[in-house]
Image (cartoon, coloured by chain):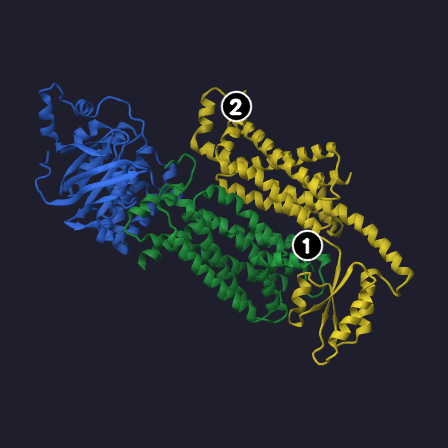
Chain colours: A green, B yellow, C blue
Amino acid sequence: MRELWTLTIFQMKRRVRDGFSIGYNVIFPLVITALLGLLTKKQFTQTITSYQYYALVMIPFCATMSIITAAYAGKEDAYAKTASRYLIAPIHEKNIVVAKILSCSLIFSCCNGVTFFVCCALWHIPSSENWWLIFLLLCVLSFVIASIGVLIGTGMKNFLVLKNVINIPIGLCAVAAGVFYPFGTSDRLIQSLQNLSPLTWINRFVFAALYDCRSKEIGILIVILVMVGVGMTALAVKNFQKEEFIHGDLPGYQK
Amino acid sequence: MGIYLVIKNNIVRATKKKGNLILMLLIPIVISILTIVSLQIKNNTVRIGILESRTASMNEEQIKIMKEIFEPYDHVEVHLAQREYEKTYQIMGKYHFYIDLDKPMQAQIDQILREVGNLETVGNTVEKAIDKNAIQETTKEEQAMQQAVGLLITTFLVLATVHGAGYINDKKGGMVDRYQIAGNGKDSYYVGYCAYTFLVTAFQCGICLGLMQIFIPNFTISIWLSLKLLGAIALLSSGLSMLLVRMCKSEMQANLLSSGLAIVLSLLAGTFVETESMPQLLQNLQVINPVHWILQMLGT
Amino acid sequence: MKNYGQTKECLFHIQNLQKSYDGKEILKGLTIPVYAGDMIGLLGPNGAGKSTMTKIIGGIEQKDAGTLLFHGKDVHKNPREFKRKLGIVPQEIALYEELSAYENIQFFASLYGLNGTKREKKIEEVLRFVGLWERRKETPAKYSGGMKRRLNIACSVVHDPEILIMDEPTVGIDPQSRNHIMNLIRSLQAAGTTVIYISHYIEEIEELCNRVIIMDHGQILVDEEKEALKKRYVEQGMDHLESIFLSITGTQLRDEVE
């Protein structure tokens, strides 16, 4: 337990130091929300302002984009050439993986939480007891994203290829979920495709919680995400590959 | 000579890994499909949701009457809506208007009709509305084309950085030093990399534009305009990306910064939001936005 | 010069170690007894299997067959206990460039279960030992090659290992730094650490080690006290370890990756 704690604290410090977690989970969503909110001011109804809309859709989107940061977190010891020291040390390999997932989850959760509450204050998102439920949803989403990212970083070959293409499915999910503009349609096929995007469900239930006062759905989503996160963590631990952890397919590395 | 060798060497390196080669071809195709799909589904239908009465048992009949009222309007659809998600679906754009069967219906219908086409009665004014829609349709097609190209530019701004970020690894690995020791100019490796990034981006962009012209019915532009667009997109993408690569210490930094910059520039250029609906200050700032210049090429 | 290897307790025993990659045998039944207090020089051409053996001992790779015994007990049964007593100085500089020297050692010490004031004491001790205490707040990015190597060693010995494997610890550094490092190694050995020293610099092994192991093609060719080995070959006109090494392993170029 102590070594897990040591590793987690160390990894958390690194996440804060490298600045990407804060940049991509706090600064970027705030800036984009302000920008998009300003650009589309006239296009929104009285139900919701443009700022409120984009605040609520941007935070989960940016949280999802952190998958790349988490993947790099999994690979950073290979880049620093310190990975072999971890394997030589008397620590369980699973603790290496779990520490990375925990550290990313905690930092991402904090950042997303700060962003959410700042947006609530700045743009007067309807006050509701569901704020805390949404914060919990963001924490659980961070956990899922961290586990998938670390799985990519420590357990999958072709990290260099994967990290470049992972943006594409996330972008597609974001477009389907209405992150860039409210994307409504009556076409059944397109609605089905939209429903394939996890962000669609997250956005839908967040709006339902705040504007239609429905919290049951968020609760169910949280439970599902926790299960997915735990599953992904187990997969990341099981799939931990020493060779990938030490070298990956960094340029110049040969088996 | 050094620059040519750098370009040639990078092309050889890029083709060494099969994965890279497939990606270079696959990514433009995916982008094109995405653009085509987003254009096809972008329609101007007004969707009305009928909120069932909590008390009355005549819901089905009421709904039938509503559908008959709005039947003459091509761009209006009427569907049954879930009351529990009333505001959610309105926020997410699933429905533009609601008719609540528990409230006086005529007032709601009249209001919707006013919003849809400023109509007071059905009849002669319907033809005007249809004509107006036709005019709007053309303008919206142009807008859709601009948005498709805007989406392309955003994606290539990011992709070009992926290609160009290899320069950072080469610098760290000592390859640039070796190149200099061999008697080549200090910056010519960098220039060579810029040229390589330009060529690869132009290649991918060419495939995208070609596919879009084939598969999108109204996306027809002259060869000369296509070439200009291709050159402009490749130049902008490679130029900006290599500038970021020069400034950043790591590949990850460069990739993340380019994603952010691409989204901001595209937003401000009117990719996702019509320029006319932006605040005046931002419309004035378009003058210095290179993405906007490229989108303007389409309009001319 | 201290009489190394007097105590004949077998501290660590590599028994019949085997490893293959893609059908190619890298280690062919390697057997090496390591006695407490030994300073073993491990020599071998490229592709001999030295790094593979080190990785297997360190738990980075799995062996195909064989046993590793530490104090007579199978390491496999309690690997963590063994790892607490093992130190490996990797060939590459394995340090976080953005952390200070102090923070680097602090972190790696924590991995070995050191914490609190005991850890802080050990960090100071080891930084003074390698001569970096005055510059403990600087990052390795600002260090010279020799300083980085010393810090690399410090991170591997902070937990007082009983057995230390050093994989080419003096590569690419100036003679003064090399001399300093060799003095450090002598101090470690004098303090009771058993050292396995892997190097291509035969003069270092000649200077430091009491026992020489020559490996090639995954097998042990020579495992002998250095003086006895030299005595054996002096009649053939070879009184330097390098000429002995070349006569045993041959002069053909070895281009395999280890």
Residue furthest to the right: B124
Which residue is the site of mark 2? B5
Q: What residue type is labelled 2?
A: Leu
Residue at coordinates 37% horizontally, 47% vertically from top-left?
A241
Mark 2 secondary-structure assignment:
helix
Please tell me which residue is depicted at 45% across the width and 44% down the height of the picture: A159
**Residue B105 percent coordinates (x, y):** 79, 74
Residue A36 position in % (x across, y down): 66, 53
Give the crowd class for mark 2: few <14, some 14-19, many >=20 residues within 10 Å. few
Looking at the image, residue C74 lies above or below residue B173: below
Q: Is residue C94 above or below residue A229?
A: above
Q: Distance between the residues labelled 2 and 1?
A: 48 Å
User: Which element is circle 1 on?
Assistant: helix
Which numbered marker is on residue B243? Answer: none
Looking at this view, is C23 or C161 the one in front?
C23
Q: C109 left or right of A132?
A: left
The three-letter code of the residue at mark 1 reads Leu
Q: Work out whether residue A176 can be spotted.
A: yes
Q: Quadrant of the C terminus of chain B?
A: top right
